[in-house]
Amino acid sequence: MAKSSEGLVVLILGVTGYIGGAIGVSLKKKHPTSIYKAFVRSAEAAEAVKAAGFEVVQGTGNAEWDRNVVAKEAADADVVINTADADDLELVNSILEALKNSVKELPILIHTSGTGVLADLPTGGFQETAKKIWDDSKPEDIKAIGPNQPHRNVDLAIFNAGKEDYFIGYIIAPSTIYGVAFDNPGNRISQQIPALIRASVERHQTVYGGEGTNVWNNVHVFDLADLYILIFEKALSERARGKPTSSDPYERFYFGSVRSHAWGDVAKRLATILYGKGVVDNDKAISIAAKELPKAITVNSQSVSNRGLFDGWTPSRAKLEDTLEEDAVATLAQLGVR
């Protein structure tokens, strides 16, 4: 597999972010002979990205200009990995158009969505709808996701384009991601758990929304990176054969889900950690109105990653509850709290 990646041009969007950084660094280690280009908006971020061994594609911060820059680079790339924004439809459409006009035969797109696409109402409670566990190995499940769900309009654009034969497209939808990506050239912490920590520090009280019984799946950031590498290698094999394994784009959708947690339980574990660090006033977690917290930690999202497991994905990293200390330390450092 390493030979098939030699000299390939891999364009990564979002390498200064948490997911993109972890994927980019991990992919470079596994396939060091590829050429890695990273789109970066700021000059300050560019220095860190260069130091990590990526070629920088410099943006400006102007959305239209940057889309044109990305499109030009995408047309010259063998593989485009988008971890920048799961909701930027204009960007994705410009990438798809660029791939249609690519100078490469059968370019590859690996796009990042999220299991927020399964979200229900933000009540902080376990709802009847949460009993449904969505299975990525069942195309009928993926087709049944409502068109107005988060990220869904972008996913549908890729599915529709994937019915044509000008590129090989995959979508990966991570669940709650945890763990610190220490080698990232940019952001090294996730979103949901740090958001709960920040909300607790602001109140000097660890909190959760509503009943705290709402459930999500989770995945360690480096197990997730392994899934991206697996899909990268699978897509390269398909490209060598001249076509994807399946002609149905809904069979090229993967959840990144390993275990599950209720957000109230996470808060209760964090309460002890945060109290021990002197940033909250007691070691208990209390309920507040769900609307006072980000929606991503007050809704339910349940999925199973059978497709990845069938393909040989073997998640092996520490459980979420065993990395909360690590996440807390990194988040508090970012806040300037010790």
Image: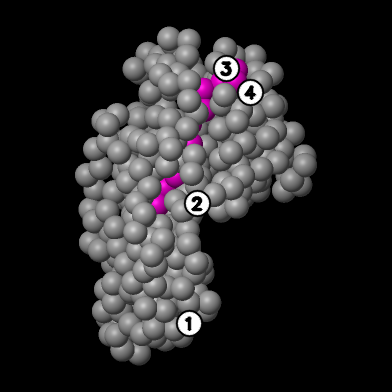
Q: Which residue is mark 1?
A: 289
CB of mark 4 within 8 Å of CB of mark 2?
A: no
For label 4, the crowd category at 10 Å Cα-Cα, with few meaning under 14, some 14 to 19 and many 20 or more, is many
Task: Identify which amino acid the numbered label 1 is placed on.
Answer: Ala
Single out the mark in the foreground, 4 or 1: 1
Q: Quadrant of the C terminus?
A: bottom left
Q: Which mark is residue 38?
A: none
Query: Between disc 4 and disc 1, whose residue precedes?
Result: 4
174 is higher (above) or lower (below) than 27: below
Q: Which residue is mark 4?
A: 99
Q: Which mark is residue 117?
A: 2
Single out the mark in the foreground, 4 or 2: 2
Query: Between disc 1 and disc 3, whose residue precedes?
Result: 3
CB of mark 1 within 8 Å of CB of mark 3?
A: no
Query: Between disc 3 and disc 4, whose residue precedes?
Result: 4
Residue 225 appears in which quarter of the rendering? top left
Q: CA distance from mark 1 to mark 3?
A: 48 Å
Task: Identify which amino acid the numbered label 3 is placed on.
Answer: Asp
Q: Which residue is mark 3?
A: 165
Specify start and end residues of the magenta stretch as a single range: 164-175
Task: Identify which amino acid the numbered label 4 is placed on.
Answer: Leu
Question: SS for tag 3?
Answer: loop
For label 3, the crowd category at 10 Å Cα-Cα, with few meaning under 14, some 14 to 19 and many 20 or more, is some
Question: SS for tag 1?
Answer: loop
Single out the mark in the foreground, 3 or 4: 3
Q: CA distance from mark 3 to mark 4?
A: 11 Å
Q: Position of residue 3 (x, y in %)?
A: 37, 13
Task: Identify which amino acid the numbered label 2 is placed on.
Answer: Val
Q: CA distance from mark 4 to mark 2?
A: 25 Å
Identify the residue shown where x is 24% and y is 56%. Answer: 319
